[in-house]
Image (cartoon, rainbow, N blue to C red):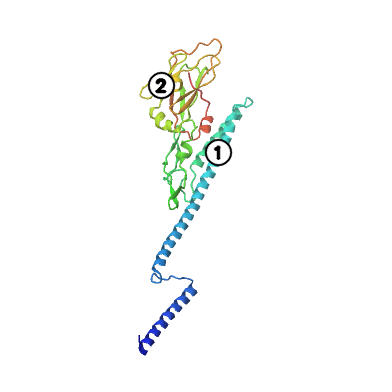
């Protein structure tokens, strides 16, 4: 094929221009260290760069969230550790109160310190973060989570919502622990109170302890729906449990409501709807076994359960009446 001189020059000039443009582009890439400056430089590469940029931004946010979660949970852990230490001191004081060598002044001093501990615990449970938000109030950060009622009990004013932050594409973590989870749901905290009626003199022959929660799910789903309960002793070996509506629910109790009243019998556990109570029959020589005419014991809800070790110890000791 014959090529004219003009065509040869035009083809050569086009090649020179293309090579020159490539050289200029390579020079710009070398100086800027960036191969793709616009989508026109490399459409596929530009799209990939956009995706990588978005992922980098997400990773930065995840890292910031992780740091924030660590700080929040670290503060909560520090407060809970302080509460544990304070409760240990309260237990020490309560145990010491039974010392035979203690005088009334010693016990008064213990009671005064326990009152201070109660205030300290309430303050700790109402701890705020650096932004002034209450860390145990759930999602109600501006609401004081725990308040003392006029009767000395406590109420939780927050909610059960945890605040979560993403720490990965498919993963999130809670930034807080609610006061409900931390203080209201302790599995073996006394959440029931027992009162026994008649005779007027508490001779200590028969006692029934406050309830201890043995199964949190059963307590929440079954026990709470029927409180307060009444335990009536029908004979020297049988008691009856009725709920607030008067329904006989004895069949749900351990041993179907039977117990031993023989002299020297050990304390017996009465298990009922996720709550355990200790029944003690402390008969003395010459005592008759319990008779049906005895009055019932009423098991009523004990709501505070926030500071059981201090709130009760600071007051005069109360024993179940029989």
Q: Is residue 108 above or below residue 130?
A: above
Q: Residues within 10 Å of mark 1 (few under 14, many from 20)?
A: few
Give the answer, above or below, for where 184 lies relative to 263: below
The percent coordinates of residue 69 (x first, y second) are 49, 50
Say which label, 1 or 2, has the lower sequence index: 1
Depth order, front residue of 170/63: 170
Residue at the farthest top position: 286
Which residue is at the front of the view, 51 or 94? 51
Question: Residue at 46% across / 40% down in the picture?
Answer: 179
Identified at 44% across, 76% down, the residue is 25
Across and down, in percent, residue 249 comes to: 39, 22
Image quarter where the N terminus lies is bottom left
Residue 21 appears left or right of 286: left
Quadrant in the picture for residue 45: bottom left
User: Does dot 2 land on a helix, a strand or a loop?
Assistant: helix
- Residue picked out by circle 2: 251
Which residue was labeled with disc 1? 84
Q: Residue at x 40, y 66 (%)?
A: 44
Across and down, in percent, residue 63 comes to 49, 55
For this orientation, the residue located farthest to the bottom is 5
Relative to 77, is 230 on the left or the right?
left
Give residue 207's position: percent from left, percent from top: 50, 20
Give the Cα separation between the discs numbered 1 and 2: 39 Å
Mark 1, secondary structure of its residue? helix
* 79 vs 300: above or below: below
Which mark is in front, 1 or 2? 2
């Amino acid at each position: 094929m014959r090529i004219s001189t003009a065509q040869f020059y035009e083809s050569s000039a086009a090649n020179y221009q293309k090579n020159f443009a490539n050289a200029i582009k390579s020079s710009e890439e070398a100086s800027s260290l960036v191969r793709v400056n616009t989508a026109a430089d490399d459409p596929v590469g530009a799209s990939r760069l956009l995706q990588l940029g978005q992922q980098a931004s997400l990773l930065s946010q995840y890292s910031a969230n992780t740091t924030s979660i660590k700080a929040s949970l670290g503060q909560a852990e520090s407060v809970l550790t302080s509460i544990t230490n304070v409760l240990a001191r309260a237990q020490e004081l309560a145990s010491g109160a039974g010392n035979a060598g203690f005088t009334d002044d010693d016990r008064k001093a213990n009671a005064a310190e326990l009152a201070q501990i109660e205030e300290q615990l309430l303050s700790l449970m109402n701890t705020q973060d650096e932004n002034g938000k209450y860390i145990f109030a759930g999602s109600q950060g501006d609401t004081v989570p725990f308040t003392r009622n006029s009767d000395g009990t406590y109420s939780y004013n927050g909610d059960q919502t945890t605040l979560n932050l993403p720490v990965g594409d498919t993963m999130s973590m809670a930034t807080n622990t609610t006061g409900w989870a931390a203080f209201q749901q302790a599995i073996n905290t006394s959440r029931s109170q027992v009162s026994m009626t008649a005779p007027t003199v508490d001779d200590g022959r028969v006692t029934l302890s406050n309830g201890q929660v043995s199964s949190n799910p059963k307590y929440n789903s079954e026990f709470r729906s029927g409180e307060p309960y009444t335990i009536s002793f029908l004979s020297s070996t049988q008691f009856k449990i009725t709920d607030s509506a008067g329904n006989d629910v004895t069949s749900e109790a351990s041993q179907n409501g039977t117990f031993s009243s023989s002299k020297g019998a050990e304390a017996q556990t009465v298990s009922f709807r996720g709550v355990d109570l200790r029944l003690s029959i402390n008969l003395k020589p010459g005592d008759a076994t319990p008779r049906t005419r005895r009055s019932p014991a009423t098991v009523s809800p004990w709501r505070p359960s926030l500071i059981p070790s201090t709130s009760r110890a600071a007051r005069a000791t109360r024993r179940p009446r029989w």
